[in-house]
C-alpha cells in the first residue's frame, strides 16, 4: 500500500490519440502526480488517453540510480516503481482522481518477457507502458479503485507485462483508518536495529540497498527479518505510516535470490527476478517486527525466456499474521 503525497498543481492532459501516439521524453511530469517528493525519483515523462479505457505512458529509465547500482540490467525494483508511477499518473491526469487521495495497492504482478531489452546501454532507455483499466465507481460516480493490465516496451522492444488492482480513498477516510498507528517520528516508536545481510549474498553491491538480515535455513525454508531504513532516499522518498509494498517486494527479491543461490550453488549476481506476483492482504506496520520466510521449489524451464527459473514463495509475517504473500520466479539471466 502506498499513500498519497502532498497536493500540488496538476498539468494539462495530453490530447487523446491512438496507440501509436507520440509521447515526450524531454521532462518528467510534476512530482505530485506520481506521489513523489524528490524530482530525481520521478521517471514518467508523459501520458495520453488512447481509447475509452486505454492509455499510454512514457518513462525514461536512468542508467545510474541508487536502486540500480550500475547492474548490467535495469533493476527489477526500478521497473516496479515505473509501473506504480504509470498507474498513479493515469488516475490523476486522466481519471480525475484528487491529488490528496490515498492509493492502496491490493495486488501487483510484474513479469519479465525478455531480458535483453532490459540491458543497460550507452544512453538512458525510453520505456513505453500501454495500459488498459477497468474502473469501479460508487453510485455518485466517484472512482473507488481500478484494475489495470500493462505491456512495457523498452526502446521499442517488448520487455515486461504487468497487472494489478488498487483502491482509492479520500484523505479523510485514510487518516481515520490509520490514525492509531505509530509513525517513526512518534516518541514511543522503537524497534530493534537489525544487521543487514552481506550485499553480495543477496545480489546487491550497495549496502544501503540491503533490506533483510542474513537468511537462515530453517526446516526446509529460509527466514530473515526485514531491515527498515526510513531514511532511504528511494524507498522512503517521503514519510510513510507503514512499510511500503515496494520495500516488501524488494526484500522478497533479496531473500529469494539468496535462498536460490545457496540452495543450488549459484552466483547471486547472475540471478534476476523473472516475475513477482504480490497480494497485499494487510498493512505491514512500521512499529512491528516483520519476518520473511521463503520456500524454494525446483528448477523449471521457461520457454518464453529461454532459461531455467526457480519458483519461490515468500510471506511477510507480523505477529503471526501474514501481511503480504509473494510468488517469485528467479532465473539465471547470464
Image: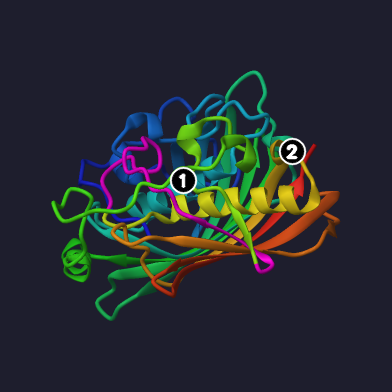
**Residue 53 relative to residue 122: left or right:** left
Instruction: Label 2: state its secondary structure.
Output: helix
Q: How many marks?
A: 2
Q: Is residue 100 above or below residue 279?
A: above
Quadrant for the C terminus, please.
top right
Q: Which residue is mark 1?
A: 48
Residue drawn 36% across the image and 45% down it: 34
Which of pointers 2 and 1 lies earlier in the amino acid sequence?
1
Residue furthest top in the image = 122
Disc 2 from disc 1: Cα separation: 37 Å
Residue 167 visible within the image: yes
Residue 52 visible within the image: no
Residue drawn 75% across the image and 49% down it: 331
What label does residue 319 carry, if any?
Answer: none
Q: Is residue 161 above or below residue 271?
A: below
Residue furthest left in the image = 187
Q: Which residue is mark 2?
A: 270
Residue furthest bottom in the image = 139
Q: Which residues are magenta?
A: 219-240
Q: Position of residue 11 (x, y in %)?
A: 29, 39
Residue 235 lies in the magenta stretch: yes
Residue drawn 45% across the image and 50% down it: 247
Amino acid at each position: 500500500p502506498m499513500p498519497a503525497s502532498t497536493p500540488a498543481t496538476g498539468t494539462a492532459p495530453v490530447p487523446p490519440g491512438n496507440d501509436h501516439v507520440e509521447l515526450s521524453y524531454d521532462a518528467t511530469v510534476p512530482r505530485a502526480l506520481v506521489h513523489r517528493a524528490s524530482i530525481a525519483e520521478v521517471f514518467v515523462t508523459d501520458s495520453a488517453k488512447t481509447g475509452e479505457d486505454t492509455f499510454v505512458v512514457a518513462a525514461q529509465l536512468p542508467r545510474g540510480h541508487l536502486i540500480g547500482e550500475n547492474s548490467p540490467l535495469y533493476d527489477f525494483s526500478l521497473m516496479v516503481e515505473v509501473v506504480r508511477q504509470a498507474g498513479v499518473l493515469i488516475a490523476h491526469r486522466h481519471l480525475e482522481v484528487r491529488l490528496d487521495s490515498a492509493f492502496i495497492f491490493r495486488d501487483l504482478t510484474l513479469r519479465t518477457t525478455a531480458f535483453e531489452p532490459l540491458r543497460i546501454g550507452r544512453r538512458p532507455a525510453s520505456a513505453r507502458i500501454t495500459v488498459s483499466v477497468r474502473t469501479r465507481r460508487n453510485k455518485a460516480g466517484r472512482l473507488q479503485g481500478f484494475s489495470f493490465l500493462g505491456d512495457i516496451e523498452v526502446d521499442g522492444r517488448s520487455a515486461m507485462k504487468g497487472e494489478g488492482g488498487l483502491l482509492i480513498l479520500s484523505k479523510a477516510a485514510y487518516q481515520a483508518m490509520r490514525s492509531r498507528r505509530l509513525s517513526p517520528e512518534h516518541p514511543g516508536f522503537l524497534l530493534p536495529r537489525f544487521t543487514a545481510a552481506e550485499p553480495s549474498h543477496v545480489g546487491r553491491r550497495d549496502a544501503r540497498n540491503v533490506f533483510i538480515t542474513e537468511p537462515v535455513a530453517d526446516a526446509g525454508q529460509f527466514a530473515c527479518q526485514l531491515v527498515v531504513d526510513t531514511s532511504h532516499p528511494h524507498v522512503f522518498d517521503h514519510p510513510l505510516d507503514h512499510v511500503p509494498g515496494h520495500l516488501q517486494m524488494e526484500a522478497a527479491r533479496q531473500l529469494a535470490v539468496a535462498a536460490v543461490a545457496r540452495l543450488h550453488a549459484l552466483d547471486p549476481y547472475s540471478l534476476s527476478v523473472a516475475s513477482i506476483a504480490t497480494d497485499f492482504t494487510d498493512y505491514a506496520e512500521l512499529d512491528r517486527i516483520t519476518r520473511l520466510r521463503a520456500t524454494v521449489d525446483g528448477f523449471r524451464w521457461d520457454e518464453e525466456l529461454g532459461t531455467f527459473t526457480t519458483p519461490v514463495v515468500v510471506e511477510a509475517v507480523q505477529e503471526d499474521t501474514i501481511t503480504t504473500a509473494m510468488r517469485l520466479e528467479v532465473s539465471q539471466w547470464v
